[in-house]
Image: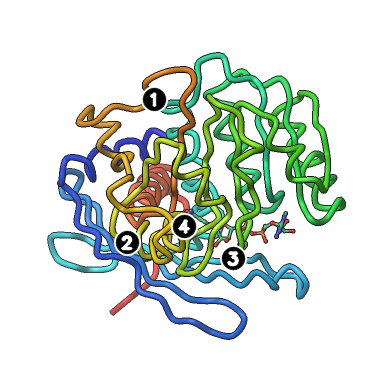
Amino acid sequence: MQAVEEAFREHGLGRAQMPPKSYLYYPQGDLRTMPAYLEGRGSTGVKIVNVHPGNPEVGLPTVMALMVLNSSSTGAPLAAMGATYLTAMRTGAAGGVAARLLSRPGSRVAGFVGAGAQARTQLLALSRVLKLETVRVADVSMQRCRDFERECRPILDCEYVLTTDIQEACRCDVLVTTTPSRTPLVRSEWIEDGTHINAIGADAKGKEELEAALLCRSRVVVDDMVQAVHSGEVNVPISQGTYLQSQIHGQIGEVVAGKISGREDDREITIFDSTGLAIQDVATATVVYEKARKSGRGTALKFM
Ligand SMILES: NC(=O)c1ccc[n+]([C@@H]2O[C@H](COP(=O)([O-])OP(=O)(O)OC[C@H]3O[C@@H](n4cnc5c(N)ncnc54)[C@H](O)[C@@H]3O)[C@@H](O)[C@H]2O)c1
């Protein structure tokens, strides 16, 4: 979370290079490349990552990734690393940073729509920034809800409510949505004033999880304006004219850097629209690389 928050700050201060992700679309999913350069830290590299929602049925994760870190001074590759776990961790970290900045003080109940890989690291991060007493988890599959509770209880031992009814998960202080949905799942009327929402699942054109009416009554903070308009929670409503880009409050890095406000009172609904930024990958992969170098882990490879 520290590395991701720092990366958001650099982005907010205009000290990061990050061209928008490029996508290849397949009938079953997509593949993206994500380059970035954190100028202050000198960290740079590129991630290759897929999203194939049907993969769990063939025994593979929906999201898998490979990261290459480079030297900014020579361009030479420094390391190649599997980045599937890294992706889940940096996505969770973004949710944790956003919840710390935007949720109502005293938030005790977290709701989850989607109980897959990203939901687990979202809960891990929330457990570090909030004093959660209850976790409400909704998924189309009750078995996935049960697996979620079994795997998450060692991280956070609290009351778990498992359900297939999304409305039930919405009775919470902090809601996290992590499905690959292409139709809104969360209705505006289910969300009470004061709720904070981490909208994580919509990260490609055509994806959405929240009703446009909900966006319209909320303070929406995106991770990156260009990416969010193209592929974030706001992408479909903006393209349909039911929500305007000018209604977006700003970017999370601008909140971290103190350039814009976060939550302003206990009654407002706040939404963090996360598309996932390449700077999150570069920042966290650099931490992994430095730790591996220090502890002598990894395998020396000859790239040239
Ligand atoms: N914002 C980011 O940085 C970021 C990073 C990684 C992944 N993602 C996105 O997050 C989403 C989830 O990724 P994941 O790795 O957790 O996938 P996953 O397949 O592990 O989990 C998704 C879960 O959502 C559930 N689900 C699907 N449709 C549902 C519905 N209509 N109602 C309730 N539950 C439903 C599935 O049963 C599954 O348990 C994907 O869309 C992915 O592209 C975003």
* Secondary element type, mark 2: strand
Badge 1 is on which residue?
Answer: 263
- Image location (x, y in percent) of residue 201: 55, 55
> In the shown orientation, is residue 117 left or right of residue 219?
right
Badge 4 is on which residue?
Answer: 298
Ligand 1 lies in quarter = bottom right
Badge 3 is on which residue?
Answer: 182
Q: Amino acid at mark 2?
A: Leu
| Label whose residue precedes the other's in the sequence (1 or 2) | 2
Number of the front mark, 3 or 2: 3
Q: Quadrant of the N terminus?
A: top left
What residue lies at 58% left-to-right and 54% top-to-bottom? 209
Picture quadrant where residue 84 is located: bottom right
* Secondary element type, mark 3: loop
**Which residue is more in the foreground, 241 or 283?**
241
CA gap, disc 3 and disc 2: 33 Å
CA gap, disc 2 and disc 4: 14 Å
Picture quadrant where residue 106 is located: top right
| Label whose residue precedes the other's in the sequence (4 or 1) | 1
